Image: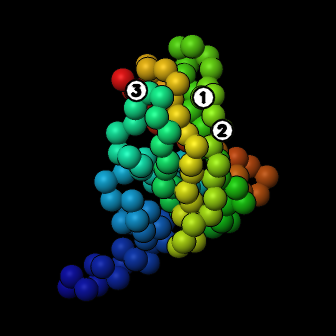
Amino acid sequence: MARRAIALVCLLPSACLAQACDAELAGGSRLESARFVVGFRTEPQTVAVGKHFAMTISVCPKAGVQTPESVSVDAFMPEHRHGMNYKAQVTSASPPGSYHASGLMFHMPGRWEFVFDVRSGDRTDRLTRPIVVQ
């Protein structure tokens, strides 16, 4: 009986993709748009003002969605209406759907938002996650 239940769950492509994103980024954060599941974690796990950090990103397209043509990450400080002073470099990694971002740095403490833009076809999905930097 359990074997059938597992087989039925894996017949739902979106459930399998979401599980793959979760498995790749255990201990990270998960975001979801209508077309993608995005998982990420920072390296180091706790980011500090004035210290460069990197990020591992996993992007899983949902059923019927093309793989992303591009992925970018930035951060924005809504209350001050500005972003970071540094632009992240995002490169493809292995396995497919994995990316590594480097060169990120928060130059001041406060409330920030990570901003992920995932482009596929003629559309871009923007996913955000708030973060407080001390």
Mark-to-mark CA distance, 1 and 2: 7 Å
Query: Which residue carries the number 3 mark?
Result: 133
Q: Which of 125 and 12 is in front in this view?
A: 125
Q: In which quarter of the image is the N terminus?
A: bottom left
Name the residue rendered at 33%, 59% in the picture. Answer: 26
Residue occupying the far left of the picture:
1
Q: Relative to residue 43, is residue 82 depicted above or below? A: above
Query: Which residue carries the number 2 mark?
Result: 87
Neighbor class of circle 1 (other Cα within 10 Å; few <14, some 14-19, many 20+) is some
Query: Which residue carries the number 1 mark?
Result: 84
Residue 32 seen:
no
Task: State the image quarter where residue 110 is shown.
Answer: top left
Task: State the image quarter where residue 94 is shown.
Answer: bottom right
Q: Is mark 3 on a helix, strand or loop?
A: strand
Which kind of residue does numbered mark 3 sit on? Val
Q: In which quarter of the image is the C terminus?
A: top left
Which kind of residue does numbered mark 1 sit on? Met
Q: Relative to residue 58, is residue 89 depicted above or below? A: above
Name the residue rendered at 39%, 26% in the picture. Answer: 132
Name the residue rendered at 53%, 14% in the picture. Answer: 79
Provide residue 27's location: percent of width, then percent of height.
31, 54
Q: Relative to residue 50, is residue 55 depicted above or below? A: below
Q: What element carries label 1?
A: loop
**Which sits earlier in the primary sequence, circle 1 or circle 3?**
1
Q: Nearer the viewer, residue 37 or 10?
A: 37
Residue occupying the far right of the picture:
122
Name the residue rendered at 56%, 48% in the picture. Answer: 102
